[in-house]
Every structure is written in C-alpha cells, then in structure tokens.
Amino acid sequence: MNTAAADYTLGSTSEVGRLRAVMLHRPGDELRRLTPRNNDQLLFDGLPWVDRAQEEHDDFADLLRSHGVDVYLLGDLLTETIAHSGAARIQGIAAAVSARRLGTHLADDLAGHLRGLAPAELSHVLTAGMTFDELPVTPSAELSSLVRRMHHGPEFAIDPLPNLLFTRDSSFWIGARFAITSLALPARVRETSLTDLIYAHHPRFTGARRAYESQVAPVEGGDVLLLSHGVVAVGVGERTTPAGAEALARSLFDDGLAHTVLAVPIEQARAFMHLDTVCTMVDTDAVVMYPNIAESMEAYTLRNHDDTVTVSGARPFVEAAAEAMGIDKLRVIDTGLDPITAEREQWDDGNNTLALAPGVVVSYNRNVETNRRLVDSGIAVLEIEGRELGSGRGGPRCMSCPLARDEL
Ligand SMILES: NC(=[NH2+])NCCC[C@H](N)C(=O)O
C-alpha cells in the first residue's frame, strides 16, 4: 500500500490530465486457468505464458511509477480490504459461491471454509477461482454431496476472473466519484463484486462517493471516454447497451457530473468490444482513431438543459465531439495506414493508448506504424512489451483504471 500522504485528490475529469494514481491488476493464477477449451468463453484469444505476462506487467507498472504515478494493485487492495472488514469478506464470498451451481449443501460448506481463510488466501480464491479438486476435503461432504460426486475435478466450483487484468472495465472515476460498472458478459460479471468491495471498504477510499449507483443496464469502463469537463463519450456495441448508455447519461446529469453525453455506436464484433479499442485521447484536443472507421464514426448527443434530457440524431462523431467540447476541431491523428496494417494494429491495441499527461501516451511497442505516426504528430510515445499481455485483447488503457488525474 502507498502510505505517504498524497498531494492529489482522487478523481478525474479528463482522459489526459497528468496521471497521479492508477489501479492495475498484476495478472496471477487466474491466467493459469485458461485452457484451449475455455479460452473463448473466458475472452482470451490464446493462452498467455503467465510468467512472461507478469514480467511485462511489472515493466508497465514500473514505467508508470517512474513517471510519478502511484500504482495500486487490485490484488493487494483486495487483500487489505478483506483484512480490514468482516463485511467485505462476507460479501466477497457471497458473490463467489453460487448455490445455483453447488447446491445449498455444498455452497454452505464452502462458504464456511472460505470464511476461515487468511485474507491473502481468500483474495486468491476470489480472483483465481477454485476447482472441484481444490475444494476442502471434508469426508462428510464427500459422502453427502451429489454435486461433488458428479462434477469432474478440474471443473470450476468458483470461476476464475482472468479479465481482472483489464481494470478499466470494472470501475471508472468521473469527477470526484467512482462508478462501479455493470459488465455484460458472464465471464466478467463477478469482477465488479470485487471493485465494489474495495471502494466500499478499503480505508484509502473512505468517504469517496459513487456515481451511477443504479447500475441498471450494462456499461463497461472501456466504453467511457471523458472527452473534456462535463463531456463524456460512451461506446454502444458488444458491451454497453443503449439502455446502459442512457441510464449512465441520466445519472451523470442528475449528479451534475456531465452536461453532454455522446453515444457512439460501434460494431458488435470481438475486435471492437469497447470504444477504447478504436479511439483514445492522446492530447486535450486530439484522438488516435482506427482509420478504417474514422470517417463513419457517429454520435447521438444527449444533453441536459434545466433537468430536461434531449437526444439529437446521429452525426459525425468528430463534429459532435468538438462542438460539445467547445473547441474548433477535434484533431484526429492521421495514422494514414493502409487498411490491412491498420486492421492488424487495431487488433493489437494500437489505438488503445493510456495518456500520462497531454501529449504523452503509453502504447504497445508492436504497433510500429501507429506509434511512428503518433510521434510524427508530436505525441511522446512510451512503449511497453505486450506479447503475452495482449492475448486477452487489451492495451495500456484497458489495463489501467485512473484513480487520480490533475485537472487540466
Ligand atoms: N477496455 C478494454 N478494451 N478492455 C479490453 C477487455 C478485453 C477482455 N478480454 C474482454 O473481452 O472483455
């Protein structure tokens, strides 16, 4: 845990203000659960070499630290939260142990066992999951649980959460508040039970208030871009639904956290699962965008006037964004790539940059062409290795949840 008193306050009003604190998740044993039989369902396109992924992630974290960013690791926060709060322990267990899967008999047994674990052990189970083989050996349960008898040993009694790595999606900050999202796909739904615990019970977040409390419909953080003070873009596609975008917009309006929300339709396809896979901000007035869609990207504009919400029809995203942000033009860094190179680099998260400050971004080094064009446009690019990290389809932005950025 970072113990020194921080000289910044939690919260964020932009994508590019100087980054002061971030939450990452160092990938752990949950990645070792991936097999060729479950990787599709668990939203990985291959099986990462876990030790290497951890090294790459450590380098990412070190790069951020070397730029003055406080790095909080989700696994540590979770362990500290469980150590600190009995209620957190109970809540985390309740979200992980499913009577629907295990039956009440085995579920009660398992919950009882988990209540007795040390904080780090419980944190491990909540992230890496548990197989039937790993269930505690109690002779009575062996004899009396049909569920136990009929399940195969390597099946999951508690599912692992390999996509915790992508901390962007399970929570985000807007203004001085945090929002727990509502993840769309079964493989990720339980992630928010962990971010919820951390923000509710970890002493670092005491007093922090929530945004989007209702969580009525799917909204994922990778779809949410803080374009400028009061202006938010929300991708609508495979993950965030129209209902999610509207619910989020109305809630941000009610809380005075935004005055304009741009709902941006994106293709419902694996390669474009979030808005930040095709577009991220690299400067106060500039984005890097997947060139194959730059022309066609549109937005519906939701505005709040005196507590009345209006929705206006789709128009080019770049125009709608500039108008809402009150600038002449939103610069789209022209990567000028041919469609095939552009498609390859989009797949490898070339457009998924994390800004450390206006004009300074972190990017995967494999996106040679996109990075070169960014540099040519005056953007400083700090490169990291993502050979193994990238197999889950997420780049530096996906793998980070900014907890604090300086105001612009
Ligand atoms: N913000 C993002 N683009 N996150 C990437 C998430 C990747 C993850 N495997 C998923 O499919 O959900």
Image (cartoon, helix red, strand yellow):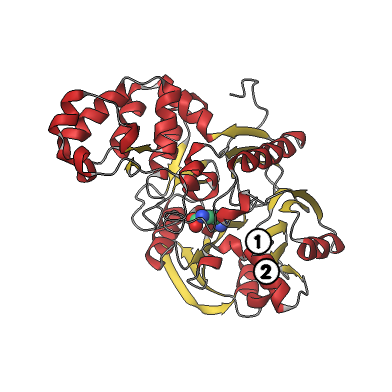
Circles 2 and 1: CB atoms closer than 8 Å: yes
Point 58% across, 51% down: residue: 398
Q: Is residue 229 visible?
A: no
- 338 or 136: nearer the eye? 136
> What residue is pinned by disc 2?
344
> Would residue 227 appear left or right of 41 to someone viewing this image?
right
Q: Secondary structure at mark 2?
A: helix
Q: The residue under label 2 is which amino acid type?
A: Arg
Q: Which mark is residue 361?
A: none
**Observer-nearest residue: 196 or 31?**
31
Rendered image quadrant of residue 165 = top right
Q: Position of residue 388 (x, y in %)?
A: 63, 49
Measured as percent of width and height from the top left, residue 63 is found at 74, 39
Q: Position of residue 67 (x, y in %)?
A: 76, 37
Q: Is residue 145 left or right of residue 25?
A: left
> Is residue 41 placed above or below 310 in the rendered structure?
above
Q: Is residue 316 left or right of residue 250?
A: right
- Give, as a three-letter code, the residue at label 1: Asp
Circle 2 residues within 10 Å: few <14, some 14–19, many ≥20: few
The one of 93 and 308 positioned closer to us in this rendering: 93
Identify residue for label 1.
Answer: 348
Q: Residue at x 65, y 20 (%)?
A: 4
Residue 132 appears in the rendering? yes
